Image: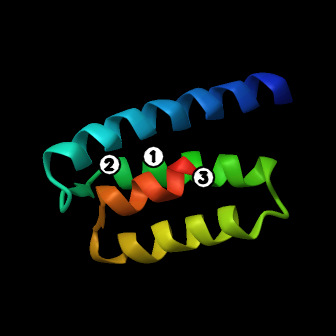
Amino acid sequence: MSKDDTHYRVWVGLSGLRQQLSGLVDKDPEQDVRGIAIPVIDALVGEAKSFLVDDPVVARGQDVLSAGAFDGYVRAADLLLVSAY
């Protein structure tokens, strides 16, 4: 897969993630994201980070996700903020 294809796939993934999280947050601002979604989202944010290597906000976003997932869940509102950048 070319770098452009990977970049597009990440952009589409983040766009879809933002849509889904926005819907969850609209229904319940305290909604948690759990289970298999955590490593999948972590991989998506990690891939985005590879395109923005020197961006401190993106780097911290993945740190927040990884730290938040320590207890097995992350608030959807927090993920929405991370994915919206």
- Disc nearest the viewer among 2 and 3: 3
- The crowding category of the residue bearing disc 3, from other C-alpha atoms within 10 Å (few below 14, some 14 to 19, many at least 20), is few
Figure quadrant of residue 55: bottom right
Labels 1 and 2 touching (C-beta < 8 A): yes
Count the marks: how many?
3
- The crowding category of the residue bearing disc 1, from other C-alpha atoms within 10 Å (few below 14, some 14 to 19, many at least 20), is few
Q: Nearer the viewer, residue 27 or 10?
A: 27
* Amino acid type at mark 2: Ile
Q: Which x, y percent locates residue 85?
A: 60, 52
**Sequence order check, earlier mark of 2 and 3:** 2
Q: Nearer the viewer, residue 71 or 26?
A: 26
Left or right for 16, reference 25 = right
Does dot 1 land on a helix, a strand or a loop?
helix
Does dot 3 land on a helix, a strand or a loop?
loop
Disc 1 and disc 2: Cα gap in Å? 7 Å
Report the residue marked by disc 2.
36
Disc 3 and disc 1: Cα gap in Å? 18 Å
Left or right for 19, reference 32 = right
Left or right for 26, reference 70 = left
- In this orientation, does residue 43 appear? yes
Disc 2 and disc 3: Cα gap in Å? 23 Å
Report the residue marked by disc 3.
85
* Amino acid type at mark 1: Val
Disc marking residue 40: 1
